[in-house]
Amino acid sequence: MNEKIKIIAGVAIFAVIFTCPLWINMGKAKEAPVPVLAEKAKAAKACILPKDEMRAKHMKILDGWRNSVVRDGQRIHMVKDADGKEKEYEMSLSNTCLGCHTNKAEFCDKCHSYASVNPYCWDCHVDPNAKKEASL
Amino acid sequence: MKNRREFLKTAGATAVGVSALSGSAFAIGEYFISSKETKPHAEEKTATRWGMVINTKKLNEEVIHEITTACHTKHNVPDCMTFAEPKDPKRKKHHEIKWIWEEHYHNAFAPDVVEYLSKKLEHTPFLVLCNQCQNPPCVQACPTKATFKRPDGIVLMDFHRCIGCRFCMAACPYGSRSFNFQDPRNGLPDRLPTNPAFPTRMKGVVEKCNFCAERLAIGKKPYCEEVSKGAIITGDLGDEHSEIRKLLEENNAITRKSSLGTGPSVFYLV
C-alpha cells in the first residue's frame, strides 16, 4: 500500500504525456481550406454534377473516366444538368477539368494537402497551365 | 430443420447470384462510367483490325527524322541524351525510351535475314515500332492486364495499371518496349511536357507506341502517317477494299519475324 502515491503519480504522468498531442494542439486547428474557383470555372457556373456531389464523388468519377477512356475507348461523358438537358464532356483530367479549373494549386492541391491525400495523378498527367508560369 | 442437401443448394445459389451481380463491367475490378452515359467521339476512326504499311522506298533520312520527332514530341517521349544522370553517354543509352526508330535490315529482320542480300535492301532504312500483333505475347505476359488488345487490334497500354515488372519487355520479340528507369520528365525540356495535352509517364512504367489511339479517337491520322509524305499508310486490314489492303495486294511486303506467329500488323514494302 506504500506504493499508492508512486503508482498514482506514475499513471498521472503517463496520462499527461500520452495525451499531450491533444492538449498542446487544442484550439489550434486550422480552418478547412475552401477551394478557390478560377474565373473560367465561375463563368461556366456549373460543373458536370452539383457542387456537393462533385465534392464527394470527384475521385470516383475520375477513376471511372480513366477506365472508360483507356479500357472501353469511350471519350465522351453525357450528363444531365439541372434543367434536365444533356451535356457532353470529354473525359480528360488535363484538358476538361483543368481547362476550367485553371488554378490547380488553389483548387486541387489546397484541400488535398490539408487532408493529407496524395493522388498520383500528377506524376503523369500534366497541368496545362504550368508551362505559362514557368516561362514567365 | 434444414438438411445438408438444402444447405448446399442455398449456398450454391447464393454464390451464383453474387458472381452474377459483380458483372462483366467489373471484370478487371475497377469502376467504369456506365456505358449508357458514355460514347465515343462522333468523328472517331474505326477499323476491324488496324494495320500499317511502311513504304521503305519513300523513307530517307529527312522523312525518318520528321516522323520520329513528331511521334516523340507529341507523346512526351523523353530524350535520353538530355538526362542529367548517368553522365556516361554509353550508360545513358540504357535509359533510352523509344516509340518509333530507325533500324538496320539485319537487326530488324533477324534471324530471317537473307544471306546474299541485294545491295539496295542492305542500305534501305527501316522504321520499327510496336507491331500491334494479332497474337501479342506481351498481353499474355502482363500479370496486371495493363497491356491489352482492343477489339480493333490495337495493343494498348493502360499506364495506370503497369507495375513495371517488365515481363512484357521480355516477351516482346521486337524490342518495342522501353522501361522508365528514371522519372521520364528528367528527359523533357525544363521537365515540362512537349505536348501539354498528352500525359507523360512516371518512373517504373513501361511504354511503347500506342498507334496514336488518342488521335484515332478524335478522327485524326496517327502523327507518323501525317508527316511521312506518303511513306506510312494506316488503315483497316480487315476491310478488303481498304487502301492498305490494295497496297499489300499489289506490292511485295514483308513483316518482322513472321515465323514466331505473333501476326504483326505492320508491313514493309521493299
Image (cartoon, coloured by chain):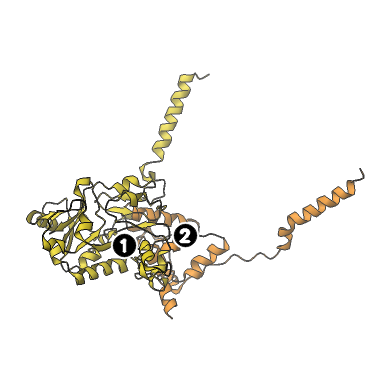
- Give the residue pinned by disc 1: B98
| Residue located 10% across and 57% down the image | B247
| Residue located 46% across and 57% down the image | A59
Above-or-below relation of B151 to A88:
above
Dot 2 falls on a residue whose secondary structure is loop
Looking at the picture, tell me which residue is in the foreground, A64 or B27.
B27
Return the mark for residue B261: none
The colour with which the image depicts chain A is orange
The colour with which the image depicts chain B is yellow
* Occupied quadrant, residue B219: bottom left
Residue A115 image offset from top left, x and y in percent: 57, 60
Evaluate whether residue B186 shows in this view.
yes
Q: Identify the amino acid type marked 2.
A: Tyr
- Give the residue pinned by disc 2: A120
Q: Which chain contains the residue that carries disc 2? A: A
Residue extending farthest left = B250
Residue B197 image offset from top left, x and y in percent: 35, 67
Circle 1/circle 2 CB separation < 8 Å? no
- How far separated are the C-alphas under marks 1 and 2? 24 Å
* Occupied quadrant, residue B116: bottom left
Badge 2 crowding class, 10 Å Cα cut-off, few under 14, some 14 to 19, many 20 or more, is few
| Residue located 42% across and 52% down the image | B163
Mark 1 vs mark 2: give the one in front. Answer: 1
Q: Which chain contains the residue that carries disc 1? A: B
Q: Quadrant of the C terminus of chain A?
A: bottom left
Q: Identify the amino acid type marked 1.
A: Lys
